[in-house]
């Protein structure tokens, strides 16, 4: 065998396989080291100050629309998905009976005002009668005095004096009767005007009651929002308090984020929150603040809470609803609906606040002025009827 052939064969052998894998391993190790370093840096700078959950949903008020009086439905002013403003008519009931009752109450008030006017006139007549009886008594006494002088002079008989004495007694009794009559006439109207006389006040209260009953045959929207869950139908006879539909004010929404109990240690009221909704994706970011935590876990308020006293107890991590207030302008720009899924991330750097709302803390409240003018309009009608019959 030629030694040159052996050398050529040795030169043509491939390189040993250990060289290339060693370089790949080195590169992979560097990449893993950089990733680990990045994770550590992220945790130290951001991660340890963040508590996140995807178990979060949009919440809001579902305002039930109910009638305050019973009746038959004659009109429905809105349906599901319609936008309505507070005070707009949602349901109209048949108001025939209410209008008849209102007319009767108006007539009764007018009649009562005129009767009280007659009582004032009778009191005036009684005062005039009293004055007349006082004059008659004065005249009888003067006549008696004059006749006594004549008897002393022998000009008249004593019989006439006795008649004069009887006349004084009669006049005095008539005066007492006139005083009692005046007291009886003044009793119903003393220290009052026509508008404040008790009978007039009672009739006015009946008129207000009839007006309010007629007014309530129109069922208004309690708040501005979107109509949902309409149950009422035309021709249906409804009773007071039965839900007819609901109105959801979509400009007053918040998020209920269900955090694990192990995540609540550093969550405080007032901490900033960033949120994203599945309906918009990560392109739309909402900003909010922590408003408070619920009084218990979701399991504590469930219809059938878990019986942990059994022998088969298994620990389950509980979740507590945390209320997140949203920026109203962002909600207006990108509208949300009840129940939509949200991803919530709370920045817990500021940890000096309260975890739960304490006495004197901020609290939420709601009110509607839709029903505020019922009595004002009724009072105006009462004043109009009284003035027309004075």
Image: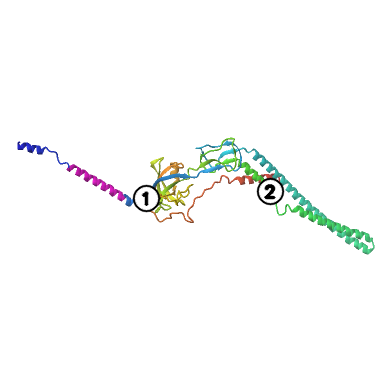
Q: Is residue 302 above or below residue 170?
A: above
Residue 337 painted magenta? no
Toward the bottom, the furthest residue is 152
Q: Is residue 383 visible?
A: no
Toward the top, the furthest residue is 234
Q: Position of residue 186 (x, y in %)?
A: 75, 53
Q: Position of residue 373 (x, y in %)?
A: 59, 45
Q: In terms of depth relative to the viewer, which is nearer, 50 or 82?
A: 50
Q: Which residues are magenta?
A: 18-41
Q: Position of residue 97 (x, y in %)?
A: 65, 39
Tell me, for residue 202, which label it has, or none: 2
Secondary element at image label 2: helix
Locate the N terminus by quadrant.
top left
Tag 1 residue? 50
Q: In terms of depth relative to the viewer, which is nearer, 334 or 35?
A: 35
**For the residues marked 2 and 1, what is the alpha-carbon distance in whole angstroms?**
66 Å
Q: Is residue 215 above or below residue 295?
A: above
Residue 29 left/right relative to 243: left
Locate residue 156: give its quadrant.
bottom right
Residue located 81% across and 57% down the image: 176
């Amino acid at each position: 065998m030629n030694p040159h052939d052996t050398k050529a064969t040795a030169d043509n052998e491939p390189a040993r396989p250990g060289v290339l894998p060693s370089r790949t391993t080195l590169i992979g190790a560097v990449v893993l080291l950089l990733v680990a370093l990045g994770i550590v840096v992220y945790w130290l700078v951001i991660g340890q100050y963040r508590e996140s959950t995807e178990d979060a949903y949009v919440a809001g008020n579902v305002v039930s629309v109910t009638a305050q009086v019973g009746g038959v439905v004659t009109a429905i002013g809105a349906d599901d998905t319609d936008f309505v403003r507070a005070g707009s008519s949602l349901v109209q009931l048949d108001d025939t009976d209410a209008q008849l009752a209102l007319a009767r109450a108006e007539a009764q008030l007018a009649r009562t005002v005129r009767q009280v006017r007659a009582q004032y006139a009778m009191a005036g007549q009684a005062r005039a009668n009293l004055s007349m009886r006082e004059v008659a008594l004065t005249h009888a006494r003067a006549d008696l005095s004059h006749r006594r002088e004549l008897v002393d002079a022998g000009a008249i008989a004593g019989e006439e004096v006795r008649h004069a004495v009887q006349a004084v007694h009669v006049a005095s009794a008539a005066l007492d009767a006139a005083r009692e009559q005046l007291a009886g006439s003044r009793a119903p109207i003393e220290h009052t005007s026509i508008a404040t006389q008790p009978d007039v006040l009672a009739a006015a209260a009946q008129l207000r009651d009839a007006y309010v009953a007629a007014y309530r045959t129109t069922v208004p929207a309690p708040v501005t929002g979107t109509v949902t869950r309409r149950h009422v139908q035309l021709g249906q006879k409804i009773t007071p308090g039965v839900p007819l539909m609901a109105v959801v004010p979509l400009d007053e929404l918040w998020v209920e984020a269900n955090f694990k109990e192990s995540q609540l240690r550093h969550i405080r009221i007032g901490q900033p929150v960033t949120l994203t909704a599945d309906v918009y994706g990560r392109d739309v970011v909402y900003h909010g603040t922590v408003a408070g935590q619920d009084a218990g876990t979701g399991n504590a308020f469930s219809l059938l809470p878990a019986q942990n006293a059994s022998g088969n107890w298994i620990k389950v991590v509980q979740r507590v609803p945390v209320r997140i207030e949203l920026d109203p302008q962002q909600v207006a720009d990108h509208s949300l609906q009840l129940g939509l899924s949200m991803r919530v991330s709370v920045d817990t750097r500021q940890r000096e606040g309260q975890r739960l709302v304490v006495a004197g803390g901020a609290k939420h409240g709601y009110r509607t002025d839709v029903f505020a003018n019922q009595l004002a309009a009724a009072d105006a009608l009462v004043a109009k009827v009284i003035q027309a019959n004075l």
